[in-house]
Image: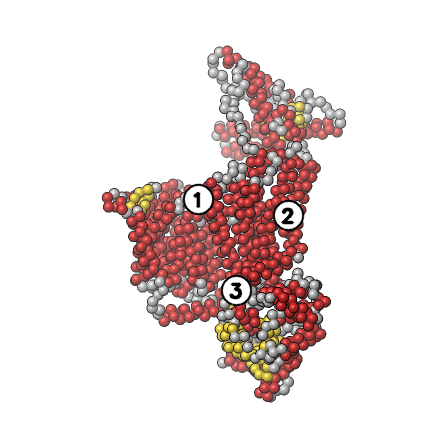
Amino acid sequence: MSWRNVKLIFMREVLDQLRDRRTLFMVAVLPILLYPLMGIGMFQMTAIFSEQPRTVVILGADNLPDLPLLDDDHFARTWFRISTDADKLRVISDGAETAPSADPAVNEARTKVLEQAKQMRELLKRRVDAETELEAAQAAKRPVDEVLALEAKVHQLIEPLSQRFHASGIQVLIIVPPEFKQNLLHLRDELGRRGADDKVLAPIDYPRPLIVQNSADEKSVIAHSRVTEVMREWERSLLRKYLRESGLPEHLPTPINPTPIDLAAANQVSANVWSKLFPSLLVIMALTGAFYPAVDLGAGEKERGTMETLLICPATRTEIVLGKFLTVLMFSASTALLNLSSLGFTGKYMASLASGGGAASKFGDLSLPPFSSLIWILVMLVPLASLFSALCLAFATFARSSKEGQYYLTPLLMVTMGLTVFCSSPAVDIEPFYSVIPVMGPALLLKGLLKATGPDMTLYMYAIPVLLTSIGYSLLALWWAIDQFGREEVLFREAERFDLRLWVKHLLRDKEPTPSFTEAGFCFLLILMLQFLSMKSMQMAMQVATPDEQGILQIRLLLIQQIALIATPALMMGVMLTTSMRKTFSLRWPGFGRLGWAIMLPFALHPLVVELQASLQWFFPKPPPGLVEALKMMSSDALPLWLVILAFAAAPAICEEIAFRGFMLSGFSRTGKISLAVTLSSLAFGIIHMIPQQVFNASLLGIILGMMCIRSRSLLPGIAFHFVNNVLAILHGRMGETMPDTGIWSWLFRHGDGMLRYQPALLCLAALAAIALLHRLTRHPRIQSTENVTANADSTLRVLGAS
Amino acid sequence: MITVERLSKRFADLQTGGFTALDGVSFNVQPGEIFGLLGPNGAGKTTCLRILSTVLRPTSGTAFVAGYDVAQHPAEVRARIGFMSNNTGIYDRMTAWEMVEYFGRLYGIPEAALQERIGHLFDRLQMNNIRDVLGSKMSTGMKQKVSIARTIVHDPPVLIFDEPTSGLDVLVARNVVDEIKSLREQGKCIIYSTHIMREVEKLCHRIAIIYRGQILAIGSREDLAEQYKQPDMEELFFQLIDEHEEALKATAAR
């Protein structure tokens, strides 16, 4: 590979992009202008935006106790935490003290509102009466039709009430019962009298005020929450006053009342803001910054016909892709950085403007993150931008036209957004498992590093896996892009008419012995979807079952799931889309030898798998409680062993093998790349297991199962292996505890973490046996029957034909 | 210089299952010769030339260009050929000079020699007036000139032209044809595909008539006229195609 060519192509592409006004606008001008413009917009909005005051009506205001709740047509400012909030509620009360306004129109409107409120009070009263009547009737066991008539009456009263409330323009209605003031004073007097003699105060009950709101109306909800806040504050003051007057300590109702101390320095507050904003912005901008240039460099080049010109120059495909990749990377990184700095400076400037008061002032001065954090942003940006650049370039190369390329942005953006939203949740911090997930690792690490509390050593330790895996993913994506570029069917894809009818016809007419790659992929998606859709109904079934039934129900559900949702789709697709069930599902006698080895292998692998799982427990997130339950079931003695074996070993062994090693593997191997086919089928097998730890185990086993199936050209060794493997896991759970671990046995077994563990001596033996068995099982078959020779020749021809 | 042996190419196709674009084609081309590939659209000309220029890989058969196997040593082959077709595009946001310079550099021509060579080419093709014009502002004729300059900037011994005049007006087409003639005089090995009879008659030493991926007849104009007793090129072309169609029908009926 010549770096000179890479550099030449890179320089040309950069120049080309810089001469394109659209790209320049997207990458440079937009971020520099966008944030200040948004800032100005926000300022203007806050300036012109003043909250409309909401209407609160108080009926029976004269019955309120002496501590003044109201101040003319507002609540008294004392009761608000932010005193200006008082202006956001307009109070209309029927109190005698309310001074009539100078404007007769205002007075008239007020009278009208009060009139409506009074009507509502009347309706409410009738409703309460009707309800009391109904309760009395129910209690007295009156005839059914009488009770029903009363119920209907109550219902009839509810609807006009809510309609009237909605139409009145009142957001909150407070109804103070008569004698309320006197009742409270009585309470106070009782309290005072109690101080003199030591008798227990009899419970005093009296009618309480009503607060009417409509929780379906946003305005009413906001007004209501403000009113409750005011009332609570007022109530506390009232209580304190009464206590004081009764000669009791004021703080009696709040004996704990801790003093809050906020240690956050101003720069920490701002660091917190940045740690929330920067990682997600970095991710999103690195993606969008990569996307548009990539589409132009990939699909755009095809569209303009310059792709062929470039392909016949002496630069190799790898050099071309690398040159293009570096260009996209540069634009992705600069877009992200420009956006970040523009946001940073705008935010800082805005905060300094707002420091006089207002909502933004709580961010402090929003000082920019320290220099070390900025370096970390750069360090994390490189793998992120490389991953997105390579991915986008691969998509863009695949696309026939720029338009098609644009379509790929949405799914890419959605997935990335989902991950960033997850990462920006305050509850999510980096942990081993997240650190190896693409996008999430860098985003979470950066979030931690930018945080106010300052990074600790463990966070720096995460930098290694995060960077290593990120670079790994980027290289994989780049390899994919190069691979796309090397495929002539991708480079010379011509726009073909897509006709669903023709396509289905083609699928059913031009059947081949084994499924195609796409059909295998579709089979996987189908199974995944079915699993997802069935999850809800299975959950429901489990919830309604009694604890005794749950065990057997779980077995039943598992069997249904295996047979109906895994094996059936694969078998159906096999029947409909292929001509040879025997070839598709590798139905062939593998010979006793291979079958025997396949039965023995799990015995060797089982201890290794158990120890590997135990040693990797720290890495994975905790499994959900539902799974723990299911696993407990597997090991509990409540169910007969044969039933557990049927559901957890026999059914998966047959059904999963049919789907993953049968249909999918034979479809995936049509690429001619065995390792790719095995990897894909084992990944599919893993993903279907949903829980990270299971995904990991299943993927590993999937590789062994895949290799076994390919080499023996038979499904049977896989089924045998799978069955024995699962049986061993069940026995390990059920009987592991009873294994001896004393005397000579202590060389082999020990008990730890509530299960049977294996000693190094046993593990060494198992490893040796496993290697030997794997070698036997995955070696190439020595003798080929004539039938297989023709089959191989067939597949070679097909591969040639497809390329 | 170019040796093609039983070259075949199959493409996967959704609707028909598969499509043979090239079916056992063999020919060879000597230096100083223009070899014409004559055939209707979709006959397999472009596929054949794309294989020769290493952009596509053959399904079976071999092709040697300037002594190198196109499948084994594509880089060596690409360094020794110039390829031009009517859809080898010009970059919109590059000037004529930059475009030719860029490809010259990719061919690894030393900088001083390159500048001299481009200067010479621009003089010869009368392109000095469009030196600093961006691709997006060029007329079709200008673009074609830039394409020619790009094709021959590294002075390759083998030149491949895939319908270079299609879609051009007569004046520009004539310029292109004249340029190809002068390249022949320099002793280049040229392969030229077209569906225009007159160009073949004027330019080519030897002709291969290609139809549905197969070569129906091959030889010089005189040889063909004599062999098929048909002096008129166009008539000969239709005659061969009709015969082939009938033969196909006969095999299908059997």
Nearest the camera: A67 or A278?
A278
Nearest the camera: B252 or B18?
B18
Residue A31 got which mark? 2
Q: How far across and how far down the image is residue A75, in percent? A: 64, 26
Q: How far across and how far down the image is residue A563, in percent? A: 40, 54
**Amino acid of disc 1:** Pro
Residue A54 in view here: no
How has the structure been colored for display? Answer: secondary structure
Nearest the camera: B51 or B30?
B30
Mark pair 3, 1: CA separation: 40 Å
Q: Are marks 3 and 1 on the same chain?
A: yes
Query: Which SS class for mark 2?
Result: helix
Mark whose residue sits in front, 3 or 2? 2
Which subunit holds the residue at mark 3? A
**Amino acid of disc 3:** Arg
Crowding at mark 3 (Cα within 10 Å: few <14, some 14-19, many 20+): some
Residue shown at the point (63%, 58%) measured from the top left: A15
Q: Label 1, on which residue?
A: A621
Nearest the camera: A539 or A32?
A32
Residue shown at the point (56%, 82%) measured from the top left: B217
Q: How far across and how far down the image is residue A445, in percent? A: 50, 44
Query: Which SS class for mark 1?
Result: loop
**Amino acid of disc 2:** Pro
Which subunit holds the residue at mark 1? A
Q: Report the side of A514 relative to A356 (left or right).
A: left
Residue A132 got which mark? none
